[in-house]
Image (spheres, rainbow, N blue to C red):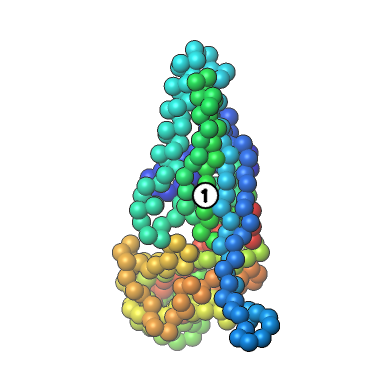
Amino acid sequence: MYGDWQLIYEGTDLRFGTREHDVEFVKLTVSGDVYRTDDSQLPRQDGTAFGQDFIESGQLAIAVKIDFTTYPAGPDECARLAWAARQAFERGWRADPVRRTPGAVCELVMGGEQAIEGRPRGVSWNDDHQGVGLITGSALFVPAGTGVFDMSDGGGWHTQTVGLVPPQTGGLKAPLKAPLSTSIESSRARPFTVAGDVPAWPIVTVKGPLGAGAQVELTSRWRMPLNRSLGAFDVVEIDTRPGHRGMTLNGRAANVLTSGAVQLADAAMAPGPQELALRGTSLEGTATASVRWRTTKESI
């Protein structure tokens, strides 16, 4: 927790934590989870009828300090530098582009070890010693979910890609040259393993060309049939992550799935062995599907 901390959102990478930054990390306090329940009283009898429980992650309180007391300057200059550092941190922590956008979230990287998504929610300051260049504070952050990303292996991102290849017999287009093309449906699957101890939310990317009726599958888990064909330069992206959920075609919002596709809120990948499959027809034989995900742990 004592490495670089970062608050990342569109156009901003606010860094603090180590002594090389004006704002230093002191301590992290994590409040307990809050439970929302559907419990109800039993009419005219003892006991409780338990419903479904939901967990709201406890907020993070990040103690920080701004210390210019050893800076080689007079008290007035030290006080000015401390105040400027406080103002700069507070502007970044306010995250105006995020708080003004419903559903948007920031990413908080904690000491280079873990990351979590959510929203910053204000900073309380103690300015009693600002006159000599010392300010302390507590920055609040509300997580969007209960899981945290493991940053220990290159940022926690992993990718698996599967290409659509022709079947071993039939459907080949002459003259034969790489990449081979096929006029009948074919499929290919690739195994991979999801690490961590809670499900990971994938970003699914499909690149054409693909004929109508193609689909991406997480074998025996879920499927995503496309509702259109894709040209050679078309790219579909399906983001299942909470706070980011949506679909795009060539970077623009579009509904690209049929009504029989898995709901994005149900498209998580459980820890353990998985298999990614792409099924369909490709006139060029170069279509691919890939999933990107981050190793996710249960708690900080």
Q: Local crowd at mark 1 within 10 Å, few (<14), some, or many (≥20)?
A: many
Residue that label 1 marks: 141
> Residue 206: image x %, image y %?
42, 69
Q: Give residue 197's quadrant in the image.
A: bottom right
Q: Of 53 and 102, which appears nearest the observer?
A: 53
Figure quadrant of residue 239: bottom left
Front position in the image: 278 or 183: 278
As drawn, 128 above or below 205: above
Q: x%, y% of residue 163?
A: 48, 71
Instruction: State whether residue 146 appears in this view.
Output: no
Q: Residue furthest right?
A: 46
Residue 190, by quadrant, is bottom right
Decide if residue 32 is on the left or right side of residue 268: right
Q: What residue appears at the point 68 percent right and 81 percent down from the top-left corner?
A: 47
Tell me, yes or no, if residue 46 can be seen here.
yes
Vertical order, 51 against 153 (above or below): below
> Could you tell me which residue is drawn at 64 percent across and 61 percent down?
298
- Numbered disc total: 1
Q: Position of residue 87 (x, y in %)?
A: 42, 33
Above or below, 166 against 122 in this view is below
Name the one closer to the observer, 66 or 105.
66
Picture residue at 38% right of the left edge, 81% below the top:
258
- Residue type at numbered disc 1: Phe
Describe residue 260's horizontal placement relative to residue 275 as left or right: left
Q: Is residue 174 left or right of residue 290?
A: left
Please identify the quadrant where the N terminus is shown: top right
| Circle 1: element type | strand
In front here: 163 or 140? 140
Q: Is residue 156 above or below residue 185?
A: above
Side (left or right) of 192 relative to 292: right
